[in-house]
Amino acid sequence: MSLLDTRVPAVLLRIDRNPFHHGTLGAVRSLGRAGADVHVIAEMTGSPIGKSRHVRRLHPPPAADASPEEIAALLLRVAARIERPAVLIPMDDAGAVAVSRLRTELTPAYLLPQQSPTLPERVADKAELAQMCAAADVAHPHTLVPESAEQAVSAARRLGFPLVAKWSRPWLLPTGSGLRSTSVLRSSQEVRELYLRGEEAGSRLLLQEFLPPGADRDWFFHGYADRSGVMRAGGTGRKLSAWPRGAGLTAVGEWAPNATVREQSERLAERLGYRGILDLDYRRCGTTGRYHLLDFNPRPGAQFRLFTDTAGLDVVRAQHLDLTHRPLPEGEARPGRAFVVENYAPLSALRRVRAGRELAWYAADDAAAGRAMWALWCTHVSRRLWGRLRRTRPRPEAGAGASAGAVAVADTGAGACGEVPPRVIRQGAGLAGSPQAGLPGVPDGGGYADDEKAGSC
């Protein structure tokens, strides 16, 4: 007998265009294996996710610049095709913000957590999060929000270089702008130039202290706050390896008990009255030992399947069970369990783990999706290599030197606050380092998607 009420379908919504989002595939498999019909609203052109045998039906996503009214209309059209109320789970920040705003319009076509319609937007906003952490006595990197270019330069000098610059609402960044949600800046000129692009970015620029990376410093918490506010499923995890190296998304993660991270996360969620799935990212300060909250993502993290307990419960199954008023099984935690994204950590995918391991792409019962990923990945890597060769090829007339179109890249060493890749594109340059660049359906120069941009584990 299935854990879930299989009469109730699940609908996964993803607005950004990222063919390598393994978190969406994890949700498809988790719900599909439990017997639910899984519908996916996302851009599937060339994506391995569309090959999964657990996808009941694919639906086209809203346009990148779709209004809330257009998103609501699309979701209601999908609901009309399904002809039954469904559990709706956004898989990115843009989707989570939109769905929460539209809760009144979407009910009763969809089953959704009951909470303030503005709360997901507030926790995803980096400026709002800093204020919330201060009110809840949760450590957060020292953050300043300048109101002018001159204030930005002054704030940067107060914080010291290097520093971290973040756009408060990264889901609003326009595709193809070359703007990153998070950057490491090393000079007043870089600060001034970035601040002046605020209108283009669509949100405020924050300047934040730099917390150096190091061993055992990057942690995350995943959970599901049920209808009564009790935290169910999930757990605390440690990032063992990241892509790009030293920062970025979790390439290898381990389920590891951490009472401090859990207590901080549960206390903040309770104080806010949060309901639903959440993914919080932390970095431990090497000087004070305090765990600083870097991001509060109001949706599943890409590696949520790491926290699958002995009863088979994870956060997406917990939401489906809770919203259909079915009991959640009481399983036991599995510390030491590993999650590996094999295209970013291929050697780790070959190692045995005593407590068990889950791969992001390969699954014996859903092999077609894994095969499709490798085919797409090889194409992606080949295009990247060819692009680099073309940019670095000497000009015939000069006989030496890089081409005029070469992308300017600053090597920053380690990332900031667990969020910034080791190589940060200078502002104004195209994102040749983006994992989506050159992929089908994804324009070159597009920004990082939620779990492959700075700010997501």
Image (cartoon, helix red, strand yellow):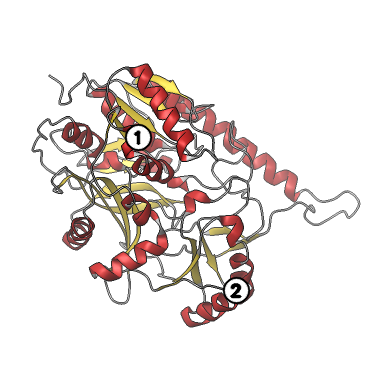
Residue drawn where x is 40% and y is 57% of the image:
125
On screen, residue 50 versus residue 309, left or right, reads right
Q: Residue 276 — which label?
A: none
Disc 2 target residue: 149
Based on the displayed image, in which of its 4 quarters is residue 339 positioned?
A: top left
On screen, residue 300 versus residue 370, left or right, reads left
Labels 2, 1: front one: 1
On screen, residue 294 versus residue 453, left or right, reads left
Q: Can residue 50 be seen in this view?
A: yes
Residue 457, given in percent of the width and then of the height, sits at 37, 51
Could you tell me the amino acid type at mark 2? Ala
Based on the displayed image, in which of its 4 quarters is residue 152 positioned?
A: bottom right
Disc 1 target residue: 105
| Secondary element at image label 1 | helix
Q: In this view, does 120 lie above or below 382?
A: below
Based on the displayed image, in which of its 4 quarters is residue 277 positioned?
A: top left
On screen, residue 340 versus residue 357, left or right, reads right
Residue 72, given in percent of the width and then of the height, sits at 42, 33
Residue 304, given in percent of the width and then of the height, sits at 29, 42
Residue 229, given in percent of the width and then of the height, sits at 15, 49
Q: Nearer the viewer, residue 431 or 349?
A: 431
Q: Is residue 215 above or below residue 28?
A: below
Alpha-carbon span between mark 2 and mark 1: 40 Å
Could you tell me the amino acid type at mark 1? Glu
| Secondary element at image label 2 | helix
Q: Which of 54 and 75 is in front in this view?
A: 75
Sequence-earlier tag: 2 or 1: 1
Location of the N terminus by quadrant is top left
Mark 1 Cα shell of 10 Å, populated few (<14), some (14-19), many (≥20): some
Do tag 2 and tag 1 residues touch (Cβ < 8 Å)?
no
Q: Is residue 244 visible?
A: no
Mark 2 Cα shell of 10 Å, populated few (<14), some (14-19), many (≥20): some
